[in-house]
Amino acid sequence: MAVIVGGITTSHIPAIGNAIARGQQDEPYWKSFFTGYPPVREWLDIHKPDVAIVIYNDHGLNFFLDKMPTFAIGAALEYHNADEGWGLPVMAPYAGDAALSWHIIEQMVDDEFDITSCQEILVDHGFTVPMQLLWPDRGPDMPRVIPVSANTVQHPIPTLKRCLDFGKSLGRAIASYPENIKVVVLGTGGLSHQLDGERAGYINKEFDRMCMEKIVSDPEALTSISRHELIRQAGSQGSEFIMWMMMRGALSERVNVVHQNYSIPISNTGAGTMILENTQ
Amino acid sequence: MPDSLDHHADIPGTTLFDGRMAMKGYALNKMCFSFNNASAREEYKSDPEAYFDKYGLNDEQKTACRGKNVLAMIAAGGNVYYLAKFAGIYGLNMQDIGAQQTGMSVEQFKEKLQRAGD
């Protein structure tokens, strides 16, 4: 049967991809962020997951306001990125695991989660930046990937409770897959930031720290945070924390924190990197 | 429109992009979404006014775009994720946009971010 080895949280902002492209990892500004990643790659080297479920939010590359799914799951043989309007490098496609995708979709819809299945979905920096951080050389251990996108573009966005419940359902779906594979679940984005409005540049270190603590010890407590309160405390785009909730739900009730790092500011954000290992 | 669709909360300096704003800004955001394609960016650059009309922008949206005024684009229904593609055409990154919206120089805005870590 399939086993979830753990979850990883990571920022996914485009500035990270630019810093990698320019080789700025050791510069003073970036060092405290990038030093958080060798332990993650070492952990991945030990566990060698066969599949990575990558939970991110589309930032206006694949989905437009004409049709905006709350939860979308990739069900393709491979996934392509695009230049996103900024001339970002177009990479070789990432291999998918369509059989597992469809198993998850079948199980989650049966579990009363209404999923948008995507046989074609362009993946943006929310997906590719974590790939660059975790598997920079895309060697033989590069896992197959399944992108999962949550709506953070347009309100109403899903509640924190719904996102945690989504993760629980995702976890059950993976655990019922008959193949003997190892799966890692990535919760990407965040932490606090706001790009738009007179409040642009807002970051909340205290709230980020609280989220990083509670996501481990008591994720249920975080479900009492309303969406408005999340925006108030974490900033407009701090809503990306919902993807952390989705990741966390897929893990066991108790998890071990193998590693964590918090770096502020990284571009306009507080950036949290964590490895949460399943205890079951 | 029923009040239940209004997701605006009283958060200073913040416009929640909800159904109302998504309807208001549809044409503007659709134009910005088109900039995912390089050919669309070239077409825009060759004649911005014609491109505004192609997507049916209203006068408020056109004026905001002409001035590259991000706060005005948001007020006209723009969503920051799509607007980022408009900004990219002019080589503006998120810190340039942040500085413009807060009335700071880019250096001042970066210092503000830096202070958040103290």
Image (tube, rainbow, N blue to C red):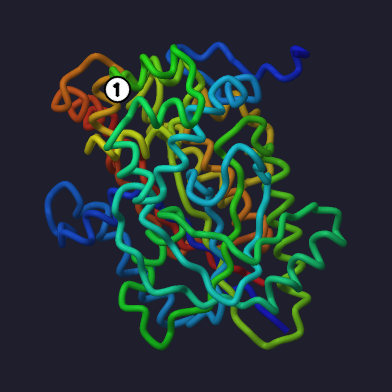
Residue for point 56% across, 57% down:
A55
> In the rendered picture of this protein, how many numbered marks are placed on residues?
1
User: Is residue B54 found left or right of A169 in the rendered image?
Assistant: left
- Quadrant where the image shows the C terminus of chain A: bottom right
Residue in front for this viewpoint, B15 or B36: B36
Which corner quadrant of the image does residue A259 belong to? bottom left
Residue holding disc 1: B68
Q: Is residue A130 above or below residue A267?
A: below
Q: Residue B100, position in %: x, y?
A: 26, 20
Residue for point 12% across, 54% down:
A27
- Quadrant where the image shows the N terminus of chain A: bottom right
Q: Residue A21, position in %: x, y?
A: 21, 61
Q: Chain of mark 1?
A: B
User: Is residue A265 found left or right of A121 in the rendered image?
Assistant: left
Badge 1 element:
loop
User: Is residue A139 found left or right of A232 in the rendered image?
Assistant: left
Residue in front for this viewpoint, A111 or A258: A111
Residue A90 in sight from this viewpoint: yes
Residue in front for this viewpoint, A265 or B4: B4
Label 1: how many Cα within 10 Å (few below 14, some 14–19, many 20+): some
Q: Is residue A64 above or below residue A74?
A: above
Q: Is residue A151 above or below residue B79?
A: below
Which kind of residue does numbered mark 1 sit on? Answer: Lys
Residue B81 in sight from this viewpoint: no
Q: Residue A216, position in %: x, y?
A: 56, 52
Q: Residue A123, position in %: x, y?
A: 49, 59
Q: Is residue A272 above or below residue B117?
A: below
Residue for point 53% across, 28% down:
B27
